[in-house]
Amino acid sequence: MLSIIQAAGWPIWPLILCSVLALALVIERFASLKTSKIAPPKLLDEAIMVSRNGVPNGDVVNQLEQNSLLGAVLAAGFRAISANPRASEDDVRASLEGAGRQAAAQLQRYLGALATIASAAPLLGLLGTVIGMIEIFGSQAGTGLTPGGGNPAQLAHGISIALYNTAFGLIVAIPALIFWRYFRARVDDFLLTMELAAERFARHLVSLRKA
């Protein structure tokens, strides 16, 4: 591996940095985008059950908020009713939507960076290719491109830079793009789940306010 890096020249170092960063982002997103941390399946039913007779106490609301992102959204609804028992349906929905936007921002965190790496890696590889081509033509300078002219070692080095950087740029970009699309789809699924849950919970809170 070290020999490949040496053969690829200095243009490969930005690609190595991108690969390390992309790997760290993928690991972080896999750890963060777990169903148990985002939207546990039974959490909404449990929140509705504990509030059948009224808004639960502050400890229960705090525990719900710390449970998951969906829990934080539901807790915002409880707090809206606690702060203003006569809150209108629009006020309740606004509090849920505000918490939902914060949750969406957390779900989408680092996805932009991963998409940037997927887009930039091929360009960095192309940069290495161009630099390799410059070295190739530089090795022929002053020889008139006559047979046997030029510096064979410099010519081979230029070809190595061009090919290794092109290949490494694609090696970094393709997995980054795949994982970005996977995480993007997963985030969309979570957002839909949370939106439906918030809609159902808003109707429950409104009925609770009228009770």
Image (cartoon, rainbow, N blue to C red):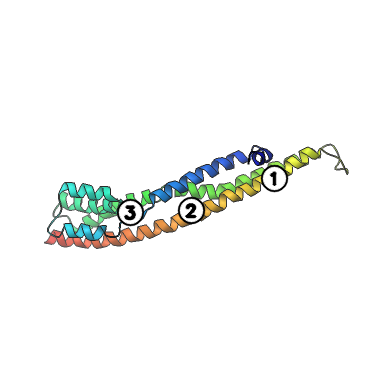
**Left or right: 29, with 77 as reference point:** right
Disc 3 on helix, strand or loop? Answer: helix
Question: Dot 3, how many residues are within 10 Å of its Cα: few (below 14), some (14-19), or many (20+)?
Answer: some
**Left or right: 161, with 50 as reference point:** right
Residue 56 visible to the viewer? yes
Residue that badge 3 annotates:
36
Front-most of residues 146 and 97: 146
Residue 89 visible to the viewer? no
Q: Which quadrant holds residue 2? A: top right
Q: In the rendered structure, which disc, 2 or 1, sits on the residue that comes first in sequence? A: 1
Q: How many marks?
A: 3
CB atoms at circles 1 and 3 under 8 Å apart? no
Disc 2 on helix, strand or loop? Answer: helix
Q: In the rendered structure, which disc, 1 or 3, sits on the residue that comes first in sequence? A: 3
Residue drawn at 17 percent across, 53 percent down: 81
CB atoms at circles 2 and 3 under 8 Å apart? no
Residue drawn at 18 percent across, 49 percent down: 60
Residue that badge 2 annotates:
180
Residue that badge 1 annotates:
162
Question: Dot 2, how many residues are within 10 Å of its Cα: few (below 14), some (14-19), or many (20+)?
Answer: many
Amino acid marked by disc 3: Ser
**Left or right: 130, with 69 as reference point:** right
The Cα–Cα distance between marks 2 and 1, rounded to whole angstroms, is 27 Å
Which quarter shows the C terminus? bottom left
Q: Which quadrant holds residue 54? A: bottom left
**Left or right: 163, with 99 as reference point:** right
In the rendered image, residue 147, in percent from the top left (x then y), is placed at: 88, 44
Q: Residue furthest right?
A: 147
> Which numbered tag is attached to residue 98?
none
In the rendered image, residue 3, in percent from the top left (x then y), is placed at: 67, 39
Amino acid marked by disc 1: Ala
